[in-house]
Image (cartoon, grey):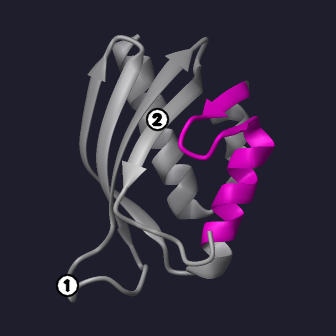
Amino acid sequence: MTDEATTLGRRMYEAFNARDLTALEAIFAVDFVSHPLGTTGVAAVSRAWSGLFAAYPEVRVTVEDMLVDRDKVAVRSVLCGIPGGAPGTAPTMMEIFRVHRGRIAELWGLSSFARQGR
């Protein structure tokens, strides 16, 4: 499971950076739950990602650390291409996701990024 979870984590961030919304169905479970956003389903991921791409056309995720324990993956990453904040700093994220049957089933996370108007 560890190799599968690592590969899936990498695929998720690669899809985000490539703006590949068609890859979402192969990455996320049909009943995926995003605990931070309070949403479920692949369409909710697509809407969230599309909103970020529209607001920040240069946004990219750079994975700094990825730790895997069986079906859980913890990731520390940086959101590049988002203006604002202290000079020379980019928002950071901490995410944990659970893999079930070859797809990401649940995600928990925290971010130093606060979107305006939310």
Whether residues under marks 1 and 2 lie with C-beta atoms below 8 angstroms apart, the answer is no
Kind of residue indicated by mark 1? Gly
Is residue 29 among what the camera can see? no
Q: Quadrant of the C terminus?
A: bottom right
Q: Quadrant of residue 60?
A: bottom left
Q: Position of residue 18 (x, y in %)?
A: 57, 62
Q: Position of residue 54 (x, y in %)?
A: 67, 77
Q: Note whether 15 is above or below 102 in the view shown.
A: below
**Which residue bears the numbered disc 1?**
88
* Pointer 1 or 2: first along the chain: 1
Q: Position of residue 34 (x, y in %)?
A: 60, 37
Q: Quadrant of the N terminus?
A: top left
Q: Secondary structure at mark 2?
A: strand
Kind of residue indicated by mark 2? Trp
Point 53% across, 43% down: residue: 36
34 is within the stretch colored magenta? yes
Point 41% across, 67% down: residue: 113
Q: Residues within 10 Å of mark 2 (few under 14, many from 20)?
A: some
Give the numbered dot on residue 111.
Answer: none
Q: Note whether 34 is above or below 81 in the view shown.
A: above
Residues 27 and 90: in front is 90
Magenta stretch in the rendered image: 31-52
**Which residue bears the numbered disc 2?**
108
Q: Residues within 10 Å of mark 1 (few under 14, many from 20)?
A: few
Point 55% across, 78% down: residue: 116
Cα–Cα span, label 1 and label 2: 27 Å
Q: Note whether 96 is above or below 55 in the view shown.
A: above
11 is within the stretch colored magenta? no
Is residue 65 among what the camera can see? yes
